[in-house]
Every structure is written in structure tokens, then in C-alpha cells.
Image: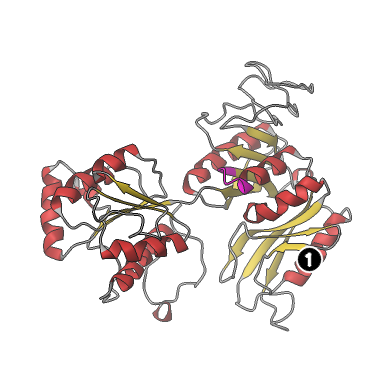
């Protein structure tokens, strides 16, 4: 439900309960991915969508029933052979949708929605299948530097929480000092980075959920995971709301001018960097979020990157390329590509080997950059580059769908 956090935050501020239906799993071809959500309030107003229209009416009624006191539950919708316009998906796949009533006073959903609306990285974990007593139980995990398990499982907080033994217990106010923290403890105060809010009801489930949430926060992906409970494994949906991934474009070329707005359109925060101030101006790159005049390798070392960051080196000048790629290929980046002819690529590889890069490190380089579209213009080249980035990010083949037997919509092969 974090994908519709902007609208739900306003509903939370009213303090009235609402129902949320969230896509927990997709099988085969389906129009929406895990995390897609529809919400319904007491007045019957609707936010969001779970299927693009195929099953919205049925899901709406399930939300109304949940608001009227129905229990949380997972519902499967698949293709209806009798009526393709019935409660099924005309695309032929199936989706599993978890429906539950949300009380805005509950700490975990409330914190997660506020953070997601404020564009702060946060994960919301909910039990969607397993023991009935645990269905709908939730915890939220804020991204931070805290080590996994540093916050006591079972702690409910709207304030600062530190690690310690878990006992039973009390309601306090203010920051919780190091030491004993009680399950269900509610505190007030500022929430610190790395905070864990809420509980899935059992210590082992909480620990597994927190570890999974922190791992998925690093990738920006939403997915289901199995967590242990006293009654056997339960399925938890980990919804992730993370800042936009970065696209770092090095080289103030016409190709960079074309690539910047395409990257922004795909949801990347785009930075263009070059050491030549005459070419590197904000007026020349209106599609970029940032335009930086700096030596490329120095900028890369000093700026924030993560496993989702894509780096495109468009200078095809060894003075810039070699030191930049030497560093980039040793960093945990999502994609590293470099422009140039096959001759330039060969010279660049030789220079990088001379810099001491291993074959495994060199194997991470996408060069010549982009897919084979026989692109001629900078605009066509930009499409070729982002197509390769998308394919690499999703572990896709980049082959024509018309000649492939693979499902059109499927779970990414890479995490």
C-alpha cells in the first residue's frame, strides 16, 4: 500500500479506518506487480488499483466487507474460462490480493505511510498467509545503519529504541534507554534511522522479517518472504518504498542530452557530470536533476551510490574513462556501461587490465553500451542504453517477445 502513500496519508490524518487490498503475488501474465494497492474508506472513496480494471469491482466489495469487520485474508483471482470479463484476469495470469482493515492509530502502518509519503526509505512487512492469529500483523523498518537485530523484536515504538532483552510490559514515554525493551511498548519522541516499529507477533518472525526488509531496502524491491512461526512458516509481504535510484551520466555529449530525460522518465534521479565547464551547464541539460562540473572519477568516489545506481560513461576518452571505470567496476553498482567503438572498447579493456582489474570485474562492464537497435541518432541511442539497463536490472533476455516463449510479465530473475 506504500505506492499510494500520498493519498493514504491524508486518510490517516482524518483518523478514520480504511481497507487496503494489496497485490502480494503474481503468477503468469498480470498487469500489476506485488505492492500494487487499492484502498477504500468508509465513504466508499477509492484510491489506487490492483489490476488495471479486471477485478476492481470484486476487490472493492472485499474492502467494504473488511471495513465492516471482516477478517484479513488472501484472495486469488485468475482467468475465468466461463467469462473472461468475470472475476478473473483477461491476460491469462493470476494475482493474489491481501485485503485487510487498517486502523491509522496502529504504529507500523502509520509510520510506513508517513515515511513513504515523505520519500524516506521504509519497508512495511505484513503477514499475508499462515496462522490465522497472525494475519495482518505488521512491522515497519526504517532504513539506517543499525545492525540487524539491534532493535528488540516485538517492540512497538514511535520513538527512539535501542537493543536489549525482551520482557513483558509497560507503556512509557520518551526515548527508551539501552537495556530492557518490552513487546508492545509504545513510546513517543523522534524515530531514529534504523528503527523497527511494530511486531508480527513472534520473536523469530520479527527477526527474519527485519533482516529481509533491510536486504530489500537496499534493492528497492517488494516481494514476499517466508518467516518462521510456532505453527510453521508464514508468508510475509515486504513492501518497500525507496528513493529514486540514481543514473550517473559522465560526459557532456549530445548522447547525454538525449539520455537524461529518458532516464528521468523511467524514475531515475539523473546526474550529468563532466570536467569541462563550457559543455556542462544546466541550460544544456534541462532533463537532469543535477549538473556537476568535476573530474568524473573523483565525483564518483565522493557521491552516494548503491546497488541500484546505473553509471553510463559516454566520453569515450581514455583520460576520463580509465580512472572512472577502474573505480566503478570495483563498486557495488547496479549497472556500468561505456560508449565507444569496438576498437575503443579493446583499448579501454587493455588499459583497465593494466590498472589491475580482474576478469570478473571487467565482466561487469557493458561495452559498447546499449542493445543492438542499429541506433543512429542520440535519441535512438538513449533508448538503446535504457533498454539494456532495464533488461540487466530485471535479469531479462532482451530478445523480441514475439519469438520468445517466456511470460510477458514475470518475477525479475535478479534481486
Q: Nearer the viewer, residue 313 or 273?
A: 273
**Can residue 132 be seen in the rendering of this structure?**
no
Q: How is the image coloured?
A: secondary structure
Query: Is 119 one of the magenta-colored residues?
Result: yes
Relative horizontal placement of residue 194, taking residue 218 as reference (left or right) = right
Q: Mark 1 points at which residue?
A: 60
**Residue at x-position 68% and y-position 65%:** 49
Q: From what the image shows, is residue 2 above or below residue 29?
A: above
Q: Give the range drawn in magenta.
A: 116-122
Residue occupying the far right of the picture = 68
Relative horizontal placement of residue 68, taking residue 86 as reference (left or right) = right
Across and down, in percent, residue 412 comes to 47, 60
Looking at the figure, which quarter contains the N terminus?
A: bottom right
**Residue at x-position 11% and y-position 51%:** 350
Q: Nearer the viewer, residue 183 or 293?
A: 293
Q: Which of 50 and 381 is in front in this view?
A: 381
**Residue at x-position 78% and y-position 55%:** 19
Q: From what the image shows, is residue 410 above or below residue 361?
A: below
Q: Residues within 10 Å of mark 1 (few under 14, many from 20)?
A: many
Q: From what the image shows, is residue 150 above or below residue 325?
A: above
Query: Is 355 one of the magenta-colored residues?
Result: no
**Can residue 135 be seen in the rendering of this structure?**
yes
**Residue at x-position 41% and y-position 63%:** 261
Q: In which quarter of the image is residue 288?
A: bottom left
Across and down, in percent, residue 78 comes to 67, 72
Across and down, in percent, residue 280 comes to 28, 53
Across and down, in percent, residue 284 comes to 33, 60
Q: How many labels were placed on the picture?
A: 1
Disc 1 is placed on an element classified as helix
Relative horizontal placement of residue 258, taking residue 168 as reference (left or right) = left
Amino acid at each position: 500500500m506504500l505506492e499510494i502513500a500520498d493519498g493514504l496519508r491524508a486518510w490517516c490524518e482524518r483518523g478514520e479506518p480504511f481497507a487496503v487490498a494489496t497485490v502480494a503475488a503474481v503468477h503468469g501474465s498480470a498487469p500489476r506487480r506485488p505492492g500494487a494497492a487499492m484502498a477504500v474508506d468508509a465513504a466508499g472513496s477509492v484510491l489506487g488499483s490492483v489490476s488495471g480494471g479486471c477485478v476492481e469491482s470484486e476487490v472493492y466489495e472485499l474492502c467494504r466487507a473488511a471495513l465492516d469487520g471482516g477478517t484479513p485474508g488472501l484472495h486469488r483471482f485468475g482467468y475465468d474460462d466461463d467469462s473472461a470479463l468475470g472475476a478473473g484476469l483477461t491476460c491469462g495470469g493470476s494475482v493474489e490480493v491481501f485485503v485487510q482493515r487498517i486502523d491509522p492509530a496502529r504504529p507500523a502502518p502509520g509510520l510506513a505511510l508517513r515515511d513513504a509519503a515523505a520519500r524516506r526509505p521504509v519497508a512495511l512487512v505484513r503477514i499475508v498467509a499462515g496462522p490465522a492469529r497472525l494475519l495482518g500483523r505488521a512491522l515497519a523498518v526504517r532504513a539506517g545503519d543499525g545492525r540487524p537485530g539491534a532493535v528488540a523484536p516485538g517492540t512497538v515504538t514511535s520513538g527512539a529504541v535501542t537493543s536489549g532483552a525482551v520482557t513483558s510490559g509497560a507503556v512509557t514515554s520518551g526515548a527508551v534507554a539501552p537495556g530492557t525493551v518490552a513487546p508492545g511498548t509504545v513510546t513517543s519522541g523522534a524515530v531514529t534511522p534504523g528503527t523497527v516499529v511494530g511486531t508480527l507477533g513472534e520473536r523469530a518472525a520479527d527477526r527474519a522479517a527485519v533482516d529481509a526488509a533491510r536486504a530489500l531496502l537496499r534493492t528497492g524491491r517488494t516481494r514476499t518472504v517466508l518467516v518462521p512461526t510456532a505453527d510453521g512458516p508464514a508468508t510475509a509481504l515486504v513492501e518497500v518504498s525507496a528513493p529514486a535510484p540514481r543514473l550517473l551520466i559522465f560526459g557532456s555529449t549530445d548522447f547525454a542530452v538525449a539520455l537524461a530525460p529518458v532516464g528521468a522518465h523511467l524514475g531515475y534521479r539523473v546526474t550529468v557530470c563532466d570536467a569541462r565547464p563550457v559543455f556542462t551547464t544546466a541550460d544544456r541539460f534541462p532533463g537532469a536533476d543535477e549538473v556537476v562540473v568535476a573530474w568524473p572519477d573523483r565525483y564518483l568516489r565522493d557521491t552516494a551510490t548503491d546497488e541500484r545506481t546505473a553509471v553510463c560513461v559516454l566520453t569515450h576518452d581514455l583520460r576520463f574513462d580509465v580512472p572512472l571505470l577502474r573505480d566503478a567496476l570495483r563498486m557495488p553498482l547496479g549497472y556500468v556501461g561505456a560508449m565507444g567503438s569496438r576498437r575503443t572498447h579493446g583499448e579501454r579493456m587493455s588499459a583497465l587490465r593494466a590498472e589491475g582489474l580482474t576478469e570478473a570485474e571487467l565482466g561487469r562492464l557493458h561495452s559498447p553500451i546499449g542493445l543492438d537497435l542499429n541506433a543512429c541518432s542520440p535519441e535512438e541511442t538513449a533508448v538503446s542504453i535504457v533498454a539494456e539497463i532495464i533488461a540487466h536490472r530485471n535479469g531479462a533476455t532482451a530478445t523480441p517477445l514475439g519469438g520468445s516463449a517466456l511470460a510477458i510479465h514475470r518475477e525479475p530473475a535478479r534481486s
